[in-house]
Amino acid sequence: MYVMVAGPVSCGKTTLCQRLAGLPLIGCKTQTIIQIGAAIDTPGEYLEGRWYWNRLINSSAEADLLLLALDCGNRHYQLMAGLASMFNCPVTGVITKADIGGEEEIESVRKRLVLAGASPVFAVSAFTGQGIESLLEFFQQEEVFQK
Ligand SMILES: Nc1nc2c(ncn2[C@@H]2O[C@H](COP(=O)(O)OP(=O)(O)OP(=O)(O)O)[C@@H](O)[C@H]2O)c(=O)[nH]1
Ligand SMILES: [Mg+2]
């Protein structure tokens, strides 16, 4: 049972995967699609560059759930409307780096994730642990991500 994580460059996907797997948070650039615990981590470039989308779609075939991530520090990145519909699995939104976002930033990211078709949407921080428990409970309900 796998959760795949996709989102723009530096939005905090790898750090979130490490947090979900209970691993030390070690920053490093993701160069290709890798497995971290029960998560499939992807490079941000694979979402930002449409010519890579086939790789995301292929890898999502292994996933029971896709987490679409966008961070609070990213004020302008627009996810394509209906983006979630290209994946053959349910798509849940994660507002990452919630520790650096005020209400306005969190709301702005939530709107962009919802427009992309992600539902439900969780606000999380891998650094402080905010929202991580709720996300893990959701995985349990959905019977995905058994560590
Ligand atoms: N404030 C804050 N910063 C974070 C958090 N999670 C990650 N970061 C920082 O954000 C930067 C990028 O984190 P990564 O997890 O490597 O981001 P990524 O989405 O995997 O990036 P790519 O692999 O390049 O696509 C690093 O400097 C992290 O320390 C968080 O919860 N809060
Ligand atoms: Mg990464």
Image: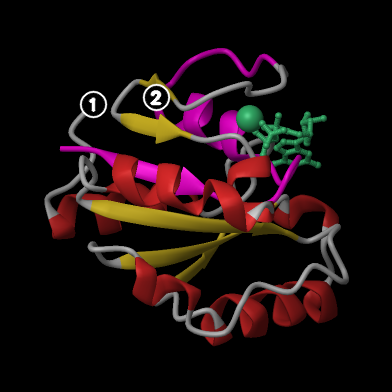
Residue 57 on image: x %, y %? 36, 52
The three-letter amino acid code for the residue at tag 1 is Lys
Q: Is mark 2 within 8 Å of ligand 1?
A: no
- Asked if residue 24 is among those painted magenta in the image, a careful observer would answer yes
Check the image and report above or below for 2 versus 80: above
Q: Residues within 10 Å of mark 1 (few under 14, many from 20)?
A: few
Residue for badge 1: 147
Residue 72 on image: x %, y %? 78, 61
Please give the name of the residue rendered at 63% of the width and 21% of the height, measured from the top-left corner. Answer: 31
Q: Is residue 127 left or right of residue 77?
A: left
Residue 62 showing in the rendered view: yes
Q: CA distance from mark 2 to mark 1?
A: 7 Å
Q: Quarter of the image containing the N terminus?
A: top left
Residue 128 on image: x %, y %? 67, 39
- Asked if residue 17 is among those painted magenta in the image, a careful observer would answer yes
Q: Is residue 26 left or right of residue 105?
A: left
Residue 123 on image: x %, y %? 58, 63
Question: Which residue occupies the extreme front position in the image?
Answer: 51
Q: Is residue 17 left or right of residue 87?
A: right
Q: Can you tell which quarter of the image residue 46 is in? A: top right
- The reply to whether the C-beta atoms of the residues labelled 2 and 1 are less than 8 Å apart is yes
- In primary-sequence order, the first of circles 2 and 1 is 2
Q: Is mark 1 within 8 Å of ligand 1?
A: no
Of residues 34 and 25, the one nearer the viewer is: 34
Q: Is residue 5 left or right of residue 86?
A: right
Please give the name of the residue rendered at 67% of the width and 52% of the height, measured from the top-left corner. Answer: 49
The three-letter amino acid code for the residue at tag 2 is Ala
Q: Can you tell which quarter of the image residue 22 is in? A: top left
Q: How is the image coloured?
A: secondary structure
Q: Quarter of the image containing the C terminus?
A: top left
Residue for badge 2: 21
